[in-house]
Amino acid sequence: MALFVSALIIGVFLGTIYGLMAFGMVASYRISRVVNLGQAGIAALGATVYYWMTAQWGAPVIVSLIGAILVGALVGGFMGWCNLLMADWPKGFVMIFTLCVTLLLFAYVDHILPPTTIAPVSPFGTGGFNFALTFVAAHQIGTFAVTLLVVTAATMLIRYTRFGLFVRAIYDDPAGAATLGIPLSIYVIGVWAMAGGMAGLAGILISNRTLLDTVLLLFVSVYALAGAVLGGLESFALAFGGGVLLGTTEGILGGGVLGQMPPGTEALGTVVIMAIAVFYAGTKRRHLAHLQT
């Protein structure tokens, strides 16, 4: 039982970060019907900016945190602006463009980071306590709390405010929304900027535990995409829940709860869930069929 609880704690920590990135992907899709694969690159850039400001410049943690999130929002807003310029392009091509942004940001991050493996300092300190065969770090508790706070605030913004009403109107009928005088450009750029800020925050939170590595952050983005597709890239709740489910499955399978298993087995749950998501996208949501590639 203690082993299960330990694996569950680790899995939920990872899952909330997957869910945070999935939330940003859904937000981008809801405003422009484009699958935003640029989240991974923004996460890497945000974590790098945070590391550089804290470790190299000696800036306070809170200043570095805000600065990294703002950089993520800036890049996200730029991608939203590019999306407006490519409004007539096939959505699959625009998705590939966002993937190219990730690859370019990965190359830049790998170029400026030191050759040694690094982990940015935690915004929540180094404290913690022992519980059920595992050390529950203050970083894990802080990550869980901050992620829930951000997701809850974003959900309320989308559901209960004028901003959210306009976002839903643009998603349902862009031409009709423009006819009503809703400034599409401002809202598209704003939502993509919000998604970029979430990605930057997710990169900071995950890199303290998994190290600042572009390959690892790419996998985080893939898991987030799987969680987002489970909700048809339309449901914020299902996207976040799918991310948490993926992280929990990974934690339980990788934690040895089911006994000794071959290396890589922890990814089994992810593979199954992603297969379900891809099948769902291609059969139940035909407008997402390009995701099957």
Image: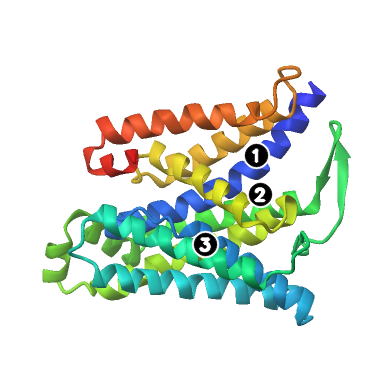
Q: Which amino acid does label 2 sit on?
A: Phe
Q: In this view, does 245 lie above or below 166?
A: above
* C-alpha separation, residue under disc 3 versus residue under disc 1: 23 Å
Q: Name the residue under label 3.
A: 41
Q: Which residue is drawn at 56% across and 61% down?
A: 43
Describe the element under mark 3 as helix, strand or loop: helix
Q: Residue at x 22, y 59 (%)?
A: 169
Q: Which residue is drawn at 52% across and 64% down?
A: 42
Q: Is residue 15 left or right of residue 291?
A: right
Q: Is residue 272 left or right of residue 52?
A: left
Asked whether 290 or 177 is in front, the reply is 290
The image's mark for residue 144 is: 2
Mark 1 burial class by Cα count in 10 Å: few <14, some 14-19, many 20+: many
Q: Which amino acid does label 1 sit on?
A: Val
Percent position of residue 185, x then y? 27, 74
Q: Which of marks 3 and 2 is nearer the N terminus?
A: 3
Percent position of residue 246, x then y? 56, 35
Q: Please name which of the two marks, 3 or 1, marks the residue nearer to the observer.
A: 3
Describe the element under mark 1 as helix, strand or loop: helix
Asked whether 205 or 93 is in front, the reply is 93
Which image quadrant for residue 30? bottom left
Q: Name the residue under label 1.
A: 12
Q: Which of marks 1 and 2 is nearer the N terminus?
A: 1
Q: Is residue 86 left or right of residue 278?
A: left
Q: In this view, does 178 lie to the left or right of 134?
A: left
Q: Quadrant of the C terminus?
A: top left
